[in-house]
Amino acid sequence: MNKKITAVLLAILMIVPAMFTACSQSTENASNGDTGVNTDQQTPTAGQEEAPETEPERLYADVPESDFGGEDFLILCSSNAEYGTVKDDFFAEELTGEAINDARFNRNATVGDKLNINIVTDPVSTGSDVGKNAITTDVKSGTGTYDLAFCCGYATSALATNGYLYNLKNVPYIALEKPWWDQVANRDLQVLGQLFYTTGDISTADNDATYCIMFNKQLIKDYNLQNPYDLVGDDKWTMDNFISMAEQVHEDTNGNGQVDREDLFGVMIWDDSMMGIVNCTGEKCCSIGEDGLLTLTIYSEKTVDAVTKFLDFALQKDIADAYQRTNWDDTWLVTKFSENGTLFLMQLIQIVPKMREMENDFGILPYFKYEEGQKNYYTTIGSWHSVFMCVPNNGCDLNRTGIVTECLANEGLYDLTVAYYEKTLVGKMSRDEESEAMLDIIFANRVFDMGWYYAVGGYNESVMNLLRNYKNDFTSMFTSAQKMANKVLQKTNDAFLEAYQEANP
């Protein structure tokens, strides 16, 4: 391993607990506008030596010594996936030399040896209902088949309100305040102080499900546009500047006088990006109110203006390609971006490694700010693509589940997350040092929006349908579903209230 990569990895090991979302950035950082970029660094004066770098203390899970007699610890893994592959952060049969596989193998082996337990996964078929139904059956039968589960937000939300999950705060030995748990997720996903699902260093699937914007460096140069990295650094990476840049890059490449797949576009827009437009303002579809319950917050002056402005731009078919209207094949999408067919691409982090064969350089950006001076760059966790950890309320041995889960998460901080960082930042994903800083910003300011996970009022689909149907009427969309949304919220909040009252008689 060359010295540059070694140095980068050392730096990553030192900053991971504080900055990388899978390493559970603190609630304080998430709320105080910390973007992960230190603007107050001081250069030592002449004759002044820099303090030697010291490796941070290795932390360990605070669990009792245990011997589980070589039993299996079965983890259900279920997810939505366009490509038919279940997101499984635990399966690794042998060492292969691939960073993430080997990190999983070593993590499982370390925990297995420490606790004399065998980590086994059940990667059920993809789809929101598959994992939900498997856990529902397990709980109703009381068989305790699964010790732990990972499902998408749609599934975990439904399971939580139906009483099929344990409150993680009541699972012994799971120390949610530790740095290997995502403190932003812990904060944003709890209702009445109850947390039924979360994420952290135990998994990387949540990182793959994070929104991002990619840009083509050659087209930036060809059109003499400002470097987007400079805009981010100057707090000027705003929706207005994004639109201004994209509108300068479009061409009828084949000269047929029609808008088609062969043309050059300013941006290729993924349908789910519309949820990101709502969240980039700092607002959510649903937020936690002062009473600790979910409240509808999708409709505000900022969200109306942001969605309206973005759609005014996005509905210009010669500039913005809503590519899923003509092609859902990600192979074509990768080829289009790789061959300089679009300036910007709005997608998920999981698409970025597919660009590693791209000849021209690209960069990675957070979602833009709604307006200059906004506190943070807010980036959405995709509701359909999300994967969260939960403990089925099936009568399993909670002490054993808590001990094993805490150890898996703890080890994940020191192997799985580092491997993911190495693979994405140092290895296959980024082409420049700036992208690393951008990813720090993205992961430090993610949005976990329960309004999307609970599909409140169907707004997750309705806001996407504005783009799909080429309609720009946010107010009408909101109003038509408001009554239904309030009913869903009432039912959801009632379920959380009932669970809270049962736990606190």
Image (spheres, grey):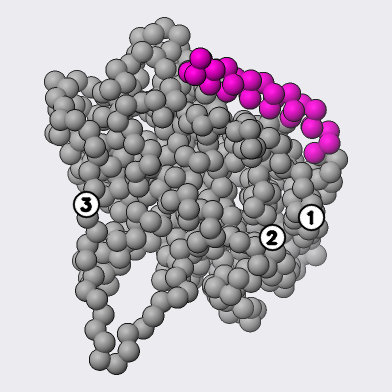
Choose mark 1 or mark 3, whichever is in front: 3
Q: Position of residue 158 (x, y in %)?
A: 56, 23
Which residue is identified by label 1?
305
Residue range of the region highlighted in magenta in the rendering: 478-505
Q: Position of residue 498 (x, y in %)?
A: 57, 17
Asked if the residues shown at circle 2 and circle 1 are in contact, with their CB atoms under 8 angstroms apart, the answer is yes
Asked if the residues shown at circle 1 and circle 3 are in contact, with their CB atoms under 8 angstroms apart, the answer is no
Choose mark 3 or mark 2, whichever is in front: 3
Which residue is identified by label 3?
58
Whole-Å distance between the Cαs marked 2 and 1? 9 Å
Whole-Å distance between the Cαs marked 1 and 3? 47 Å
Residue 503 is covered by the magenta coloring: yes
Tell me if residue 305 comes above or below residue 90 in the rendering.
Answer: below
What amino acid is labelled 3 in the image?
Arg
Tell me if residue 459 comes above or below residue 132 in the rendering.
Answer: below
Element marked by disc 2: loop
Whole-Å distance between the Cαs marked 3 and 2? 40 Å
Q: Check disc 2: other Cα within 10 Å, few if <14, some if 14-19, many if 20+.
A: many
Residue at image position (26%, 30%) is: 404
**Number of marks:** 3
Identify the residue at the far bottom of this view. 46
Quadrant of the drawing holding the N terminus? bottom left
Residue 122 is covered by the magenta coloring: no
Which numbered disc flags the more N-terminal residue, 1 or 3? 3
Image disc number at residue 370: 2
Q: 308 left or right of 206? A: right
Residue at image position (41%, 76%) is: 41
